[in-house]
Image (cartoon, rainbow, N blue to C red):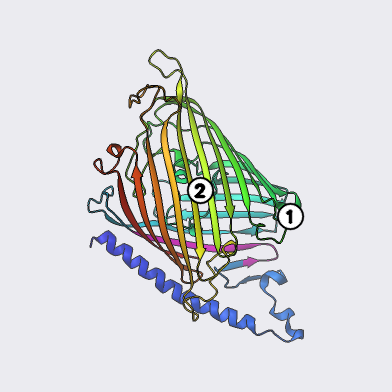
Amino acid sequence: MTLRALVAWMRVGILAASALSLAGPAVAQQAAQATSPPEPEKEAHKSPEEKGDWGFRWDNRPPLRLGRGTRIDFRARVQADLRNSDAPIPDHDDGTDIDLARNRIGINGEVLNLFDYEVEYDFVDDEDPWRDVYINYKQFDFVQVQGGKFKLPFSMDETTSATNLDFVYRSRAAIFLAPGRDRGVMVHGRILDRGMLRYEIGGFDHDGVNARTKDLERVFGERTLAGRITVQPLRSTQSVLSDLAFAVAFTTSDVPEGFPALRARTSMGAPFYLPDVSVRGERRRIGFDARWRPGPFSIKSEYMKLTQERLGQSSDETDLSKFFGEGWYVSGTWAITGENKAEGLDSPRRSLFRGGIGAVELALRAEGISFGSEATDDVPSSAPRADVILGNTDRLVTYGVNWYLNRWLKIQVNFVRERLSDPSQGPMPEQVSFWSRFVRFQFSM
């Protein structure tokens, strides 16, 4: 076992020890809450927040109350992944790797019931350690203003916190086609009956970190406009369809001349397509998604497409057909221990340390991601200025089991089968499909 692997497994052990030590204060607090004080003493037993005082009180995470409507919540998350694949893993020829995916601390909270804020730092990412850093003015539900660094309003999968993912990794489409984080300002809010319609629209410096690589010669989107509308048509009802939601999103930006910085990698991080095509002009994204979480089940689906103009990029300086990347997924989950999916599984009915086994969930996802050109009337070519681009497609099926031991510990196991339409561009040129296996240990508070 390598030194790096040994350190990683030591950290996994620390996660379990931390969760066990945290279980004690939480259980003690819940026991204290179960014994109601006599009526005359209730005022004395109010929380610091209820009385408007300063104070420190344990909850799901350690919060610091600074008076009525003002608080600081301290957060931490560590994720360690054990990965194995039939295909070679970059820098690990034996197909096995231990990866510290995320190692983050941060704070969030509110100020005077007027502002939300969040600051998060990642110790693993040397290139871009500051993750979400923003403040949100929230006095009115129908119009709020958020500024700083945060995710562009695009893609349900991409904007879901990594702590709450149904699978070890997001879909290929969300990782490589959705924009991700950038600096900007966004106006958003909820309107209509009980907030059944939510809107988000903002301007950003660029089109997100997902569209950039370490290669400074590659080009990406400049000033970007992004928006998203989400509708829950039956939110105000008490029916099983009240959680049903649909959304549409877009981004638009200009890209200078050059090779795009977009990436195309397998679940293990091996390239399966290099976008060495000349581009210049407008970049657009369009996305559609749907979600329904009835009782212990969930169904999610998403489609997105990125198109990139290639103005004046032919050998005689005429326009070429647009380059595109498109992706989709359909996923479903079932909490076999009966928890309500919409309420979250991170608080099991009976946790592992309180006489139960925690929450157990089965998950299945089918997905695909493709790259190519809109023109198809000629022989595909890998030449940078070809009108018909030789692209590639990766299709995946993921089988998963999620085990929520308690509100802090989560273990995920995924088996992934991938199939490339052109394996010669992938990690196993002689093999069309291959299997990969993932185990994630997560501690969060």
In the drawing, does residue 213 fall left or right of residue 143?
left
Q: Disc 1 and disc 2: Cα gap in Å?
A: 25 Å
Residue at the outermost bottom position = 38
Residue 436 seen in the figure: yes
The x and y percentages for residue 62 are: 55, 69
Whether residue 76 is situated above or below residue 234 in the rendered picture: below
Q: Quadrant of the N terminus?
A: bottom left
Disc nearer the start of the sequence (1/2): 2
Chief secondary structure of the magenta portion: strand
Which residue is at a point 42% across and 57% down the rendered structure image? 168
Residue 129 seen in the figure: no
Segment tinted magenta in the rendering: 65-82
Q: Provide the residue designation for mark 2.
A: 158
The amino acid pointed to by label 1 is: Arg
Q: Provide the residue designation for mark 1.
A: 194
Identify the image quadrant of residue 369: top left
Q: Is residue 134 magenta?
A: no
Which residue is at a point 77% across and 85% down the rendered structure image? 40
The x and y percentages for residue 77 are: 46, 61
Whether residue 425 is situated above or below residue 314 in the rendered picture: below
Which residue is at a point 50% across and 68% down the rendered structure image? 336
The amino acid pointed to by label 2 is: Glu
Within 10 angstroms of label 1, few (less than 14), some, or many (20 or more) residues? Answer: few
Looking at this view, is 152 or 275 the one in front?
275
Looking at this view, is 427 or 269 the one in front?
427
Identify the image quadrant of residue 34: bottom right
Label 2: state its secondary structure.
Answer: helix
Q: Is residue 67 magenta?
A: yes
Which residue is at a point 52% across and 55% down the rendered structure image? 161
Disc 1 and disc 2 in contact, CB within 8 angstroms: no
Whether residue 357 is situated above or below residue 6 in the rendered picture: below
Within 10 angstroms of label 2, few (less than 14), some, or many (20 or more) residues? Answer: many
